[in-house]
Image (tube, helix red, strand yellow):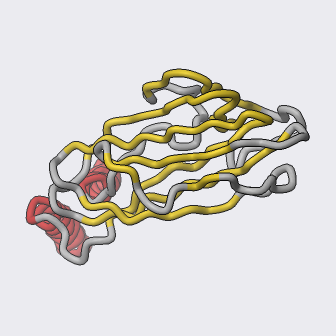
Amino acid sequence: MNRKLLVLAGISFAFAAMANAQVLNGGFESGLSPWGLSGSVSIGTGVDEGNLSHSGNSWAYFYGETGTLSQTVSVNTGDSYALTFFMQNYLDGGASTNELDVYWNGSELTPSITNVVATPINTYTEYTYNVTAGASLGTLSFTGANTSGQTLLDDVSMQDTSATPEPGTLSTGLGALMLMTFMARNRFRKSA
């Protein structure tokens, strides 16, 4: 029994070491923490004015004048990442000025998402931007405004798209594989 647990722990450790950049609470299931926020930003849960989340039970939304969400993300220096999120533009009628600007380390990613037409309730659009990590920590920010409704944001994630893993990632993964091979070999010898 203990060997099975050790094998599972080794596999878990190997996969954890190979994990991508972690945007914490990218689905806003735990409220807005650990996101930093200012201005007109809130959290929606369940069914709010007919809106639902893209997945899970919660989402963030920008309303009225400008609001900002930001988070510091651990990344591998020099690696490229696909930043992906889902957005819905909800209007309460009338003309709307709406925008969602995305920033990586203070630089606005292009194209910005401006004056997007209203989408039917519960229809999210997926957006992907490519970013490069210049240091081991990067700051991801969303600045939004919607003067006649809400701009909904959900399922923010970053996927490492670099072809070569860091040497530490490889050595940890190989170490876990060697441990599992050694344990399987010993088990086979004892059963023979």
Q: Relative to 158, is 41 above or below?
A: above
Give 173 or 121, whichever is nearer the viewer: 121
Give 143 or 24, whichever is nearer the viewer: 143
Q: Is residue 166 left or right of residue 122?
A: left
Which residue corresponds to the image point at 77% horizontal and 56% vertical from the top-left? 117
Q: Is residue 13 left or right of residue 49?
A: left
Total of numbered circles in the picture? 0
Q: Looking at the rendering, which quadrant does residue 76 occupy?
A: bottom left
Q: Is residue 167 left or right of residue 35?
A: left
Q: Position of residue 54 (x, y in %)?
A: 70, 51
- Do we see residue 190 in this rendering? no
Give 28 or 125, whichever is nearer the viewer: 125
Q: Relative to 145, is 178 above or below?
A: below
Q: Looking at the rendering, which quadrant does residue 92 occupy?
A: top right
Q: Position of residue 87 (x, y in %)?
A: 65, 51
Image quadrant holding the C terminus, namely bottom left
Which residue corresponds to the image point at 41% horizontal and 44% vertical from the top-left? 23
Q: Position of residue 144 (x, y in %)?
A: 58, 38
- Do we see residue 157 in this rendering? yes
- Report the residue that reaches farthest toward the top: 39
